[in-house]
Image: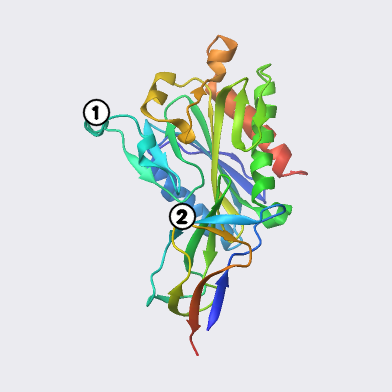
Amino acid sequence: MQTLSLDTSQRWAVRDYGEIPYGDAYALQKEHLAQVIRGGKETLLLCEHPPVLTLGRLSCEENILIPFRERLNRKIKVFSVDRGGDVTLHCPGQLVAYPILDLRKRSLDLRAYLRELEQVILDFLKGFDILSHRVDGRTGVWIRDRKVASIGIGVKKWVAFHGLAVNLDPDLELFRMIRPCGMDITMTSVAREIGKEVNCQKAKMSFEKLFRKRFFVGD
Amino acid sequence: MKRIVVPHLGEGIEEATVAFWHVNPGDRVKEDDDIVELVTDKATFHVPAGMSGLVQEIRVPKGQDVKIGETLALIEEND
């Protein structure tokens, strides 16, 4: 497992786990969550996952479109987890961020935090000269009528976990396995929109910078 | 008997949906144990027991909408 600590400030840490199975990342989130609840350092976990499907609370399994046998053959696991939102696909080529943040320190409630995460993504995409936007009532980030980033969070003792996935350059065909977020929507990626490859490492650094600017003013 | 109610979740949020019960009637809980998760928008909020005791009653089934302040469960507090 690749672990790169990008920041060692007193108040927070960034940990880049590279490509890591979803189950391992979930366990790490829970460890960091427990630490932050106890007053430990807030952490931004960055990673990618091998193809995996996750179901938020109140998801409909019918939104998994891939037949059971084919899913087994392709060794694609499904995790039911304690986040909001319906079914989501994770795969290589996504920027996945799990911020473990104390919302009370920032006077953020649930909706305000979701809007803040969207704003980080909107600013991040601006760096690629992509004009993206929110859609009322549909949390996430969109480019015209296509979705480029998904968000789903959990909050325990006002500390947030789970987070967001931005499609940098994933195989978009994989999204045929699901009805994303339980809706008939088309997914897109940064690479598709700009018509060229994306340097994922550089993109991660740019995201981390914007994230820090929004949530750690003064650091 | 203490009531576990839907907490204030934020400005403009008047209701949520009961998404997952971590306990059943008859279960013993500690103060920090999650007893239920509520969902609003794309967020899941974990509601802790807030006291040690015995879960007496679950008032709202999974999937039902609840308003802020509504009773979710009753817990008999340990002496």
Residue A187: % across, % down: 50, 23
**Residue found at the far bottom of this picture:** B79
The residue that disc 2 covers is B63
Labels 2 & 1 near each other (Cβ < 8 A): no
Q: In the rendered view, would you say A143 is above or below A13?
A: above
Q: Which residue is mark 1?
A: A70
- For the point 59% across and 34% down, the residue is A140
In this rendering, the answer to whether A37 lies above or below A50 is below
- Disc 1 marks a residue whose amino acid type is Glu
SS for dot 1? helix
A102 lies above or below A15: below
| Residue at 47% over, 54% down | A31
Residue type highlighted by circle 2: Gly
Q: Are marks 2 and 1 on the same chain?
A: no
**Which chain is disc 1 placed on?**
A
**Residue A171, visible in the rendered structure:** no
Q: Residue drawn at (61%, 56%), measured in percent from left and top?
A: B15
- The one nearer the camera, A76 or A84, is A84
Residue under the point 67% across and 51% down: A11
B8 left or right, relative to A94:
right
Q: Quadrant of the C terminus of chain A?
A: top right
